[in-house]
Amino acid sequence: MTKGRAAMGRRLEELLAVAAIGDGMITRFALRRHGLLGEFGRREAMLLTASAAGASWLLRKVGRDYEERGQLSSGSSAVGWASYLLHAGLTILAARRARPLPLGRMPSRTLGGALVLFGSTLFAAGVREFRSFEQMSGLEKGELVKSGPYRYSRNPQVVGWGLALLGAALAGRSPKALLLVAAFFVLHRVYFSIEERHLERAFGEEYRRYRATTPRFLGLTRPV
């Protein structure tokens, strides 16, 4: 039974990795379809393609780490952080260099600035709940974090980071940046499926109760 579940888990990770590649291909197709790929430039388009391939590899590697080690390897964690920074850099670059959407400049900047502020605050609040950078990065085991913003979201750091990027995209009125933000959330939806299986193995009934009452993204605690 255990071997069968492990095989099914690996198969699921392979399918999710394919989905990650597909998400990168869809994003690139959308950019090309609407005449936006050329605005990125050849170098940025290559980075976009490389990011999709890297995300696929990372998702599979993370799944293996969780299954075999019960935590991430230093290599997986380092690549994960590098991917965050690369994606954020591409999104901000796209927001600054885009052909703007037909939206009012002042409303877009006001809403975008508010999202950047709220998202950054939510991300920082999530970081504070961990006892160390290693625990936050998945490099060491610890207790299940359920305090602070984790009472309202199972993934406040991801939500906060994504909202901050969404704010930057709106402030720049950039369709390219908005597509990159959408890709960010789609890929993390794939990652959550891997991480949640790991957390259920690690914390059992405690995590199942927490998952049943707390939204994956953001919202009020649900009654059991």
Image (cartoon, grey):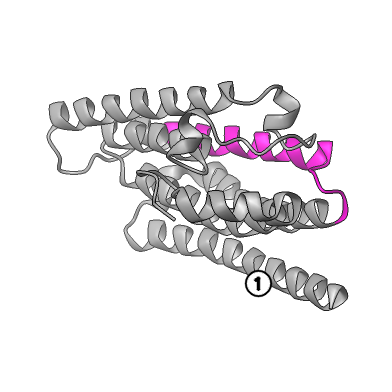
Q: Position of residue 14 (x, y in %)?
A: 71, 69
Label 1 sits on what residue type?
Answer: Leu
Residue 178 visible to an observer of this rendering: yes
Q: Is residue 56 magenta?
A: no
Residue at x-position 39% and y-position 43%: 218
Relative to 184, does residue 163 appear above or below in the rendering?
Answer: above
Q: Is residue 69 above or below residue 86?
A: below
Q: Position of residue 42 (x, y in %)?
A: 53, 46
Quarter of the figure that contains the N terminus: bottom right
Query: Is 9 left, or right, of 146 in this rendering?
Result: right
Q: Give the residue displayed 87% in from the left and 49% down from the top.
A: 69
Q: Main secondary structure of the magenta part?
A: helix
Q: Residue at x 68, y 71 (%)?
A: 12
Task: Write down the quadrant of residue 98 in the picture.
Answer: top left
The answer to whether residue 106 is left or right of residue 113 is left
Q: Nearer the viewer, residue 86 or 72?
A: 72
Question: Which stretch is magenta?
Answer: 68-93
The quarter of the image holding the C terminus is: bottom left
Q: Quadrant of residue 205?
A: bottom right
